[in-house]
Amino acid sequence: MNEIFNIRNSFEYLLDPDEELEILNDFASKKEERQEGYFEYLGSDYWQELRQKRLEQDNYECARCGSKRCLQVHHHFYRNRYQTQLSDLITLCESCHESEHR
């Protein structure tokens, strides 16, 4: 939602309401497409193998707090899908992962 708000603010003085609505709808549609592809990627053998290697390398514990519960693998940043490298990832517990996204 913040992304849409930021886009709206950047166009506030440049577009009429119909043009703004068209841009916002296009942005939302493309975001949904990206999310669908991302969830498909997370189900791939490629991601599952990479995720397992990251967990093993981090000794099945959160890299921030050391917890061994509710572990998740977080992307530091995203390259093109299927080009993720082990160094792009970090193992975090659910709590640390949530704080990473705040």
Image (cartoon, rainbow, N blue to C red):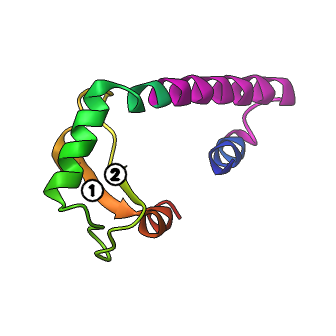
Residue at 85 percent across and 30 percent down: it is 17
Residue at 83 percent across and 29 percent down: it is 16
Mark closer to the chain start, 1 or 2: 2
Tell me the chief SS of the magenta region.
Answer: helix
Which residues are drawn in magenta? 11-38
Whether residue 32 appears in magenta in the rendering, the answer is: yes
In this orientation, which residue lies closer to the viewer: 54 or 7? Answer: 54
* Residue at the front extreme of this rendering: 69
* Residue 73 percent coordinates (x, y): 34, 51
Q: Looking at numbered disc 1 in the image, what kind of residue is underneath it?
A: Ile
Above-or-below relation of 42 to 97: above
* Residue 102 percent coordinates (x, y): 53, 65
Q: Are marks 1 and 2 in contact (CB under 8 Å)?
A: yes
Q: Secondary structure at mark 1?
A: strand
Q: On the picture, is 95 further left or further right than 81?
A: right
Q: On the picture, is 71 further left or further right than 11?
A: left
Instruction: Give neighbour class at mark 1: few <14, some 14-19, many 20+ (Cα, 10 Å).
Output: many
- Badge 1 is on which residue? 90
* Residue 27 percent coordinates (x, y): 64, 28
* Residue 55 percent coordinates (x, y): 23, 53
Residue at 41 percent across and 29 percent down: it is 43
Whether residue 63 appears in magenta in the rendering, the answer is: no
Instruction: Give neighbour class at mark 2: few <14, some 14-19, many 20+ (Cα, 10 Å).
Output: some
Where, by quadrant of the figure, is residue 96 drawn?
A: bottom left
* Residue at the right extreme of this rendering: 17
- Badge 2 is on which residue? 73
Q: Which mark is residue 77?
A: none
